[in-house]
Image: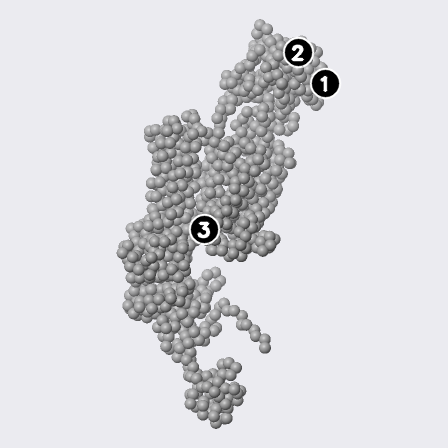
Amino acid sequence: MSDATIEVAGLRKRYGSTTALDGMTFDAVPGRVTGFVGPNGAGKSTTMRIILGLHSADAGQARIGGRPYRSLRYPLRSLGALLDASALHPARSGRNHLLWLAQSQGLGRRRVDEVIELVGLAAAGRRAAGGYSLGMRQRLGIAAALLGDPPAIMLDEPFNGMDPEGIVWLRGFLRALAGERRAVLVSSHLMSELQGMADHVVVVGRGRVIADSSVADLIAAASGDRVLVRTGAPREAAAALVAAGAEVTPASQNRLGVRAMAAERIAEVLAAGGVPFSELAPHRATLEEAYFDLTGDAVEYRAAPTEVTP
Amino acid sequence: MRSALIAEWTKQRTTPGAGWLLLITVASTVGLGAAVCAVATDQYDTVRLALSGVYLGQAPVAVLGVLAASGEYSSGLIRVTVAAMPGRSVVLAAKAVVIAVEVAVVASLALLVSVLVASQVGLSVAGEPVLRAGAGSAVYLVLVALLSLGVAVVVRDSAAAIGAVLGLLYLPPILTAMVTDPGLHRLLERAAPISGGLGVLTAWSGGFLVFGVLLFRSRDV
Amino acid sequence: MTWPRLLQAEWTKFRSVRGWAGGIAVAALLMLLFPVVGLAGGGGDKQASAATLGPDGEPVSDSYFFVHRVLAGDGQITVEVKGLASERGTPWAKAGLIISAGPEPGARYAAVLVTAGHGVRMQHDYRYDRASSDAAARWLRLTRRADTIIGEASADGQSWSRIDTVRLPGLATTVRAGLFVTCPDRVQGIGTASDTATAEFGTPRVMGDWSPAAWAGGQVGAYGARGGFTPSANGFTVSGAGDLAPATRGDVPVAAAAGDLLLGTFLALIVVVVVATLTITTEYRYGLIRGTLSARPRRGRVLAAKATVLAGVTFAAGLGATVVALPLWLRLIRGLGIFVFPAPPGVLLRAEVGTAAVLAAVAVFALALGTVLRRSATAVTAVVATTVLPYLLALVPFLPPPMAQWLTRFTPVAGLAVQQTLIRYPQVDSVYTPADGYYPLAPWAGFAVLCGYTALALAVALIVLRRRDA
């Protein structure tokens, strides 16, 4: 097991009568960005708090490079974390916030200057942190996570409140960290934020892991070999295709999703039946669609479906 | 422990609040002492008069002790602190040491000035009794700060914590006035932090700190 | 938003936080139950018999040196007071003529007297006192007609002016009358020192049916053996100590005052201050204030609505506690045989309503300071240090008494004057301290001082709120 791996094994946690974690298990390994995704209330933050030793688990354990977090002498040198960017004293400057953190890890001022430069806060470093925008606070929090030059990094919803420029910067930044053989664990409630950045995703719902796979596999599994058919006569088309052995689901008013049949074969079947069609498109799912496929049952707080009266 | 101490000291040093509170401690201690000395005549216990500013000076000291803990709870900073320093008793010990040293220095200064003011007004304060009472008062203020820290760790809310501390310090003398049963009266007087002597206050502060450590170690933050 | 809506919104905010509503309830409960602590030791020696009661049922001091003969029916006595001095110079040292209704403690009387520092006066039945217009008079005369007594004074023994005419209902036909000397303790700082007065009288001249026996002297009431009398060439030298006056708290330490039963106010005060401060500082802490203020841009009205809700809730809770607590505990402790200084129902009601009003005013004071200071700990401390600490300092025995007077006159704690149920008599020098239940200001004047501070804090809060970015 590498020094950098974040291991989560069988975590359980109850708060009163609510079960927050119900056997949460996954690893975040070095060299890749692991997305930690799930709807609000799925247990992401709780898992991260247990990893950091802030909350205690009722069962199971979390380890950093094989050791429990609370046994680390200078933990920020093993795992840098950002949980809540607003957890600051409003009157203390960003630099001084980093300074006391550095001192707690036996590090000096030089390291503070380095990380503050790295996240692009050098200009604002001496101002009181209470006046920072949410995006600046996120950058300060990331600087704090990097202080100990840790082999593992964990960020809870780091994209919240960032402007588009900041989001682009952070994606590149996290990819670069993974490129340096660090383990990077990033939580988000929006799968789209992770697209193009995460190598691996852990999808969670109701306190347990629903899917734990590479992004490529997840997308492939979700899209299957579905083909979208646009037709003016969906009913006839469906009848013809089902008769030929395909699985058909209506996608929208004039479109059908067809599984278990290649595009060429569909064209033949429809042509043979004399059913008009205007388009045949093999469908590639987005990460987000794959996510909704998975979490459909696991969402705890969901808006009631909007009723549309015709 | 050493790095925790340095970190906690930097924390205290880099917010203006703590500095202001210490300044207010000096000002209120000296101010009340001077006011009392000004209206007093020599027939009273001059040493106690000179040091009477402690009654007021303990209020900002209590705020300092409370904010050192509850301030972190209200902003969520406590999670950052505990994530950086997972040894929770060490964190609390570091906080206690930093506050104790700060208050000891500032209180000594304030009481020294109070005595100087008293002698300027013409009260005869000199010699060993003043030294002993002054040192006792400084220790008293340090213990009040530690008591406040302990209460704040237990309660985790600034307003409730400071209410509890000030209640503990200010109410017993007022309420014992109501109790006429001599045995009970004496008991209350002895058990109250303000009138019971330094030993009693040490017990209160120590008790709350130990209770605070136990809770802090077992609670989720 | 209209004012009723605004109030409704703030009320909903208040009652929906369980800790706040609970806090106020706890405050009321503390006030209601606190006297239990006082009773924990049982009645002890607080027995009703410990106090001498006057004709109106109030405790009195009834001790003096009496040089007397027996008078049957109507009659008159005249005497010259040639000199009066006491060892420590107590201003209320008294020498003069007295008609006493009987030998039992607390009996009715009427007297004309010379004092060391307060001129010539006629006093009767302990509580009543009238000064003569001629403070330098040295001749005194008492005339009895049935149950009416007339007191007169004269500078030369020739031309007399009447000081007062008083009735002693139920006065027996045969009474003891004669000369008396008494002298209360001298008030020094926060304590008293015992004093003895000595007066030179001329020979008394009597008219009416006086017993033929010679003048006899004796101490009335328990006040040691410091008095005595010696006939001189043309009169008497009489010395005595004690007082003929209403008793103060200091004289009857074992008695309780109704106001004592409200001491739990201080406990309640701290809880109320914490809750009141939190109602505004939590809005700052969680950024809620932005929502509150942007929802209703007229910030003054928001503060007013908060203050109204807070004051209303604390007043109601406080009043609920006091109107139950005071009568209940009075009954209870009287049942245990503890003597309580009498107070008319109006005074008790004022103490009950006033205490609730003090709680409400302090709650608004805390709200205002919370708005200005924005941090809970600082605001709570500021309020407690101005509303509770001054009272504590006034209790501290080694602080100079002018300090205690000043503190209870000029700081917000002056508002507690509404709890005074004891009467402060101008003709009695005593250590009138807040600890004993005497405040330097009149009840509602003291409350006005508190309201002044509250209004000032509210004004500052309003200015700050308008200028500051939320």
Q: Which residue carries the number 3 mark?
A: B157
Q: Which residue carries the number 2 mark?
A: C159
Say which quarter of the image contains residue B148.
Answer: top left
Location of residue C184 in the rendering, given as x and y in whole percent from the top left corner = 55, 21
Say which quarter of the image contains residue C327.
Answer: top right
Give the Cα distance between marks 3 and 1: 74 Å
**Residue type of the residue flagged with mark 1:** Ala
Chain of the residue that carries numbered disc 1 in the rendered image: C
Location of residue A247 in the rendering, given as x and y in whole percent from the top left corner = 47, 85
Q: Which one is in front in this view, the residue at disc 3 or the one at disc 2?
A: 2
Specify whether residue B140 is in view.
no
Above or below residue C155? Residue A249 is below
**Residue type of the residue flagged with mark 3:** Asp
Q: Which residue carries the number 1 mark?
A: C146
- Local packing at callout 3 (Cα closer than 10 Å; few below 14, some 14-19, many 20+) is many
Secondary element at tag 1: loop
Chain-order first, disc 2 or disc 1: 1
Location of residue B168 in the rendering, given as x and y in whole percent from the top left corner = 46, 42
Residue farthest to the front, as pictured: C467
Give the Cα distance between marks 3 and 2: 78 Å
